[in-house]
Amino acid sequence: MNKRRPYVRPMDGWWRRNPFFVEYMIHEGTALFVAAYAGILLNGLLHLSRGEAAWNVWLEGLKNPLYIAFHVLALVAISYHTYTWFKIMPRTMPPVIVGGKRLPDGAITGGGLAVAAAASLVLLLAVWGMAR
Amino acid sequence: MESFKADVVIVGGGGAGLRAAIAVAESDPTLKIALVSKVYPMRSHTVAAEGGSAGVKLPTDSLEYHFNDTVGGGDWLCEQDVVEYFVAHCNEELTQLEHWGCPWSRTPDGHVNVRAFGGMKIERTWFAADKTGFHMLHTLFQTSIKYPSIKRFDEHFCVDLVVANGRVQGVVAIEIGSGEFTFVEGRSVVIATGGAGRVFRENTNGGVVTGDGMALAYRHGVPLRDMEFVQYHPTCMPGTGLLFTEACRGEGGFLVNKDGYRYLQDYGLGPAEPSPRNKAMELGPRDRLSQAFWYEQQKGRTIEGQHGSVVHLDLRHLGEAKLRERLPQIYELAEQFLGVDPARAPIPVRPAVHYTMGGIMVDGLCASPLPGLYAAGECSSVGIHGANRLGSNSLSELCVFGKVAGVEAARFAKAVAPGDSASLLKQAQVVEQRVLGLKLKTGGNERIATLRKEMAQTMEDGCGIYRLAETMQKTCDKLDELKERFKQVNVEDKSSVWNTEWLLAIELEYQLDVAQSMAYSALNRRESRGAHQRLDGFEKRDDENFLQHSQAHYVAGGAPRIDYGPVKITKSKPGTRAYGAAGEKAEQERKASNV
Amino acid sequence: MSENQRTIEIEVLRYHPEKDKVPYQQVFQVPFTDDMSVLQGVQYIKDYLDGSLSFRWSCRMAICGSCGMMINGEPSLSCETFLRDYYPARVRVEALAHFPIERDLVINMEGFIEKLESIQPYIIPKEKRTLEQGEYLQTPEQLNAYEQFSSCINCMLCYAACPQFGLNPEFIGPGAMALLHRYNVDSRDGGKAERMELVASEEGVFHCTAVGYCSEVCPKHVDPANAVNQNKTNAAADYFLRFLAPKGGAK
């Protein structure tokens, strides 16, 4: 004659319940742009393998204003993804001990972002140098 | 009604109950153990103990010192043979906890570290930052999971003992989640339900600390011993009563009045030195410090706050780094609850009720006069605290006597024949009907909260730091009145699942019984000793008439009957209880006279 | 009482299994002072307005772990959340998210307890030691490696913050993983291999998608997300090391 009847609340729309979850979903959503851009690059590679003519067609296609707009959008999304990725990084790794003290979360996130920025810059310079 | 057949039943899932359960399991794995607790074990109030647990550790220390500190601290109302057993087993038990994983704070070379505590001659308080009770409780709870013979009845509220053929043979409990009753049969029962501080208004205790086990034993004729000795902790948060551990002073904190003056030097605790010397000033015992506060208040040297007078606990000179390392919880409590940064401002504090020295009368083997019934921890009076407990002795007590109670209860269970389950169950069903009656009866007009508040207020008025016959008498009368009014208590909620209003009513009835035992014991002790201080012509200790334990006996429908029992004195004759420079002088004199 | 007493509205999610099909909101007018916690507000309701309101509480000082609730949608300990921070707006109180509601603010925590019991939350000694031999030596650095994870008060706020647990209640979840990790990295413990199986299992760490909110809401700075994610690495390493060093990894 047990009168217990635990009530299970539905999970529908859970990600709208808290700003933290919304941010998480945006983070996850921006990963689609990373995937999409990888698709674009792969497509370029495919064209390259079919010879110079095909490659030029692909390059011409990139000049389409819609494509350029997509690139800008992808840059913003991927930058945001990078930022949130490094923000969560301290939570995913063993503590880093420097001089007997634990490295604070901010330093790990900041360090990660700095390395990402520097790597992007080096790559950009290298490509720019090769193009000249 | 459900029933469960155990060999040993343990009521209470705090430090003592868990330690007892493990002791039974280790002493004989074939014994079935029922651990009945009204909360999940890790919610028990052991969790809130902060400062540490005593056990002789340093080469400069000795069992004799710990013995002397404890007996003197208890104003010679201790069972000295029991204290001797206690001090001899603290270290072993705390080491056992270490082996079970307790994260004791360490010295740089990896040994367990110890800190200074009030009334202790040498540093001997083992600590885990300022969350010692929390870590001990979780260590014991998690370790208990290892033993398959321990069957837990979490969130089961014990409403009565079942006594038959002159011995206890089980308990009746309500499963809180369903409101259904269970009879837990056992050949012996250990009560480990903790103290009763919630009968007072301003206290450091959690909501669960309502003296349940004391009342259960008491109603079955077991005396409650030394109940008038209620400890006021000197450094608590105004309003809520939340605790700022004695370790604040153990680490070097000061107590100052409104003029910034370390007032304890005016009360025989000096001299005031830059860092408190053991057994002096801020490292004096709790009763003396709370009493000094009272005098400061009389002299108008306290600070008036929203929740009454306060003094200042000044930790600023210890620096933020040390505070964060040694007292992290205190730091956060001060910041979050008071908006005070203890590295930059003093913390306002005042005394609040903290601990019940007395409890269920048991002998050195934790056995009560009722065969088969054992008790350990704050609910018990095994005799080590006397008239005033020293800080950090209670956590050690949980382990040392939790184990003793477990071993003895196991031994008893094996020695007696099983009871007649059918007739015991019938008895349990009578209990069920009685307890259901409290919930289902109609027409009552008294609110639980009102009765509870009036009880807590009258206890504070009559049984506070200083006591007078007139106000104690008023408290006794008031409690009699409240017990009468309780008959008209109204439990609005008639339902079964998680009916906490019903549980509150049962707890209140427990509390009223325990409060009565305290007030009447206090009124009858016509002397001043330890935490029981009178201002009405009985200001002195009176060894001739009152070097005795008071024993409160339950009288149904009336006031308790108080009588007295002998105190076991073995090697420490009652002497002058002094601290600070005076204490050192007294000790030298004692030594000289012994030679 | 204080002269600056005001009145705040507390909206409570009520549910009584013997009467209600689904939970509903009820609003109470509660007089409060600046130092009153949400818990004290809820206690006021029980004492003076509606004795049938059910909730768990005990220590009042954020160490017993009983009084977790959703306060304005955030998992919080009600004893250390203050009414003044919400006034003059209404404060919404609800049972911890993702757990079944037994009644009002009381959740069913049996699942959590089973998880806690399943992780072998006790020292499995690396080397046996008798009491006569005294304590195990453990340097402050070794203590530091696990102390944070041993600070879990089992309040389950992290579970109420974890959507993956909400979607799949079988997931071992942040709190229990923090405790598992606490024992694995204790210098006295040698039971890591025994616990690894659970870490990598169906209910194990790989349910976690690194939302990270569990660590945000933890009132004791345990950082359970860190424990979960370190163990993803450990489980993966364990899996691959089996091929490299047959005697190295678990099983």
Image: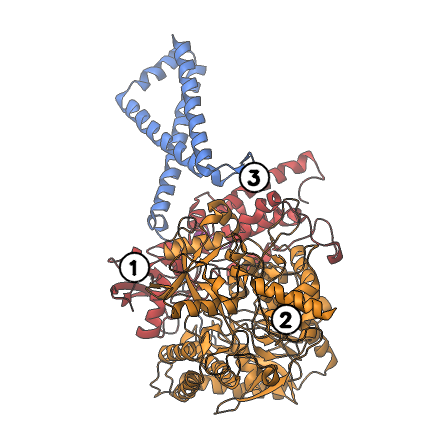
Chain colours: A blue, B orange, C red
Quadrant including the N terminus of chain B: bottom right
Residue span colored magenta: C165-170
Mark 2 and mark 3: span between their CA atoms?
55 Å
Given residues B217 and B412, the one toward you in this image is B217
Please identify the quadrant where the C terminus of chain B is shown: bottom right
Q: Nearer the viewer, mark 1 or mark 3?
A: 1
Q: CA distance from mark 2 to mark 1?
A: 52 Å
**Number of the label disc, if any, that sits on residue A128:** none
The residue that label 2 is drawn on is B71
Report the front residue among A119 and B240. Answer: B240
Measuring 34% from the left and 55% from the top, which residue is drawn there? C73
- Indicate the chain on which mark 1 is placed: C
Given the image, on which type of amino acid does mark 1 rest? Val
Q: Are marks 1 and 3 on the same chain?
A: yes
> Residue tagged by mark 3?
C233
Badge 2 amino acid: Val
